[in-house]
Amino acid sequence: MKKIREYKNIFIILGITVLMFLFLYKFAGINVLPHLGDAKGYVNTVNEASAKEVLELKEGDIYKQTIVATRDEVAGFNIRFGTYGEQVHGKLRVSFSDIASGNVYESTELDCEAIVDNQYHLFVLNPVITDGKDQQYEISIEVLNLEEGEKLALFASDKDVYKDGMLTYNGEQVSETDIACQISGTFGFMLKWYWLASIVILVGFVVFSFITFVKKCKLEFVYLTLGITFGIIYILCFPPYTAPDEGTHISTTYAFASEFLGEESLSPKSGTVIYRRTDADVDAGQQVTSQKFQNLYQAIKHPSNDLERNFERGNKLDVPFTCYLPQIIGVVIGMLLKLSGFWTMYLGKLFAMLFFTTCIFFSIKLIPWGKMVIMAIGLLPMTLELATSYSYDCLLNGLCILFISYALYLIYQKDKAKWKDFVILGAIICIISPCKMFYFLIAGMLFLIPKEKYTSKKSYWLINTGMIVLGLAVLVVMRFQFFVEHMGTATQSVIDPVNVNYSISSILSDIPHSINVLFNTVIRNSEFYFNSLWGSHLGWFQVAIPNHIIVCFVLVIFTASVCSVREEQNIYTPNIQFRLVNLGLSLLMILGILAALWIGWTPITYQTIQGVQGRYFIPFLPMVFLSMRNKIFLLQKNIDRGLAAVLFGALTCTFLYIIPYIFQ
């Protein structure tokens, strides 16, 4: 009978997998395929800021601009015209040719009526050039006729900004200027990317369903499947530099990696971080767009492989290397293996994901109750984005959640707390303390461990108090400069350079005003904190995830928090002490975060605290939700596997909502 039930479940899983494949196939037809043939400019001779001049055209003029393709595919070219807001009548002959071979790929007569003022006009090549990388081409514009009294112009630069080409007018070279034109390409390769991501989800679903509903493995293994599956999806969907503040984190990681290898990490002149030239293959664009993925595709297909350390980008943060240890290991391996910039960069993201997934795996394994709460928080869209990035929030979130689970293991399950347990917990506190201030306060949970689990009452007070003092000491030592700078005098504001930031003395000297600032912050920013906690806007607040998807995640966490089965209540009986300690510590950490950014980031003229984001609350989020556990909602049957299925569905929907931003 058991075998029959297993086979039945397997057939159901395979049936759902087929339906998912058909859905993803149809989704591709509607949301992916229509955008693959769009030709978009990828080489700009003159960008928006440099297009300060116009070259007025008259009958008989011939302008020729040379331009070099940086990709294999050349699907067309664009020219930016100006009509001064009027419709123009006349004809132009526009051609596109290969300088080396003299082959003319396109020559067409353009009716001036089709030109839109201050816009690029696209000329499509047929057939498309497929081997154009590093080839030099010539764009020619000849004015055949132009209605008398009407004006038509080419946008141009006021200096020679495009060093790979030159401009000629009626056969004579024009120095110190280039006309605004582009080479365009399509994004056919992104169909392979889409199906790669889809296959990851389909395979992940089969494995998840099998271990969850057929083999009924423990919840930590269910999480492992989800964590790896959607960790890979987030690595695929969010390229380097697209996570919040990731550029600075990447620079800091690469600086530490260089130091580990005995190389100079910072430029003596500018103080910026020194990279290998090949690391410049990955551009620093912060938006999730098809252009970003096109650049990555070129970084894979045509890596520079130049290992010379002659490229500079970004600054190094004043934090210890331990904050970036997973990413540093990945980057160091990439450098030792002499991998290209692309693969080295993605090794750092991969090691970050593996580290975070390992932390959550052992967190779920250790925690005696509330396993689903840990799992759901570990799979939030915002959590996954940070877990697959270079941000030190990856390490911070993973270790804080692991600390909470370990503490609950000592409180409710282990018979005696041993010195090895406190060595592990102490190491975690030492690592997280200097990353962001005040998270060391989670060590206060250790006071919930029953005194009889220690060798003596004296040990109970010494160890637990010592753990908090240890965290504070590490914080002060590692961030001593910060405290010195902000203790009395105000520092220069980054947001508003004409003003200074709040300081500790300015906050304490005007208590009523400070209370008003704190009140305004809570009232005006609470919605933003809530949304940025769950991940309703990913990337640099660019990728919007609909509220009904976010609600699914919130409901799963809330349900897992308030409901319990009888086996769990035998382990943990809800009590006021547990709630007060956890909620009190959480409140202290929230106030600490607000205080740190109040004096470190907020100009003294502002009426709200700046720089605080909801993602800063993820490290202690389990403490808040675990405090909701009660005796009222007692379930007859464990629903964790059903909630895990809801999470899989919500995460898949999140992926589908990210797609339009990638293909825009």
Image (spheres, rainbow, N blue to C red):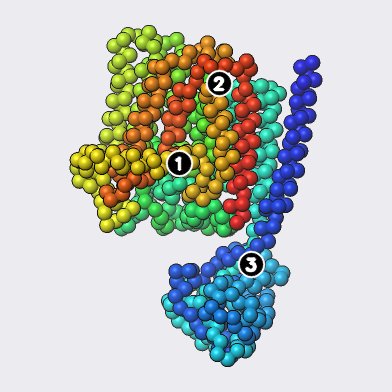
Of pointers 2 and 3, the one earlier in the residue sequence: 3
What is the crowding at mark 2: few (fewer than 14 residues within 10 Å), some, or many (at least 20)?
A: some
Q: Residue at x 43, y 50 (%)?
A: 247
- Name the image quarter holding the C terminus: bottom right
| Residue 580 in the image, given as x and y percentages of width and height | 38, 21
Of pointers 1 and 3, the one earlier in the residue sequence: 3
Quadrant in which residue 590 is drawn: top left
Q: Is residue 379 visible?
A: no
Q: Is residue 47 left or right of residue 237?
A: left
What whole-number distance in Å separates the C-alpha atoms at marks 2 and 3? 59 Å
Label 3's element?
A: strand
What whole-number distance in Å separates the C-alpha atoms at marks 1 and 3? 46 Å
What whole-number distance in Å separates the C-alpha atoms at marks 1 and 2? 26 Å
Label 1's element?
A: helix
Q: Amino acid at mark 1?
A: Glu
Query: Measured along the vertical axis of the image, is residue 144 above or below residue 485?
Result: below
| Residue 485 in the image, given as x and y percentages of width and height | 23, 44
Label 2's element?
A: loop
Mark number displayed over residue 74: 3
Query: Measured along the vertical axis of the image, is residue 123 above or below residue 304?
Result: below
Q: Amino acid at mark 3?
A: Val
Are dots 1 and 2 in contact, CB under 8 Å?
Answer: no
- Name the image quarter holding the N terminus: top right
**Which residue position is annotated with label 2?**
563
Mark number displayed over residue 527: 1
Q: Residue at x 35, y 42 (%)?
A: 520
Q: Residue at x 65, y 62 (%)?
A: 38
Of pointers 1 and 2, the one earlier in the residue sequence: 1
Of badges 1 and 3, the one in the foreground is 1
Of badges 2 and 3, the one in the foreground is 2
Q: Amino acid at mark 2?
A: Cys
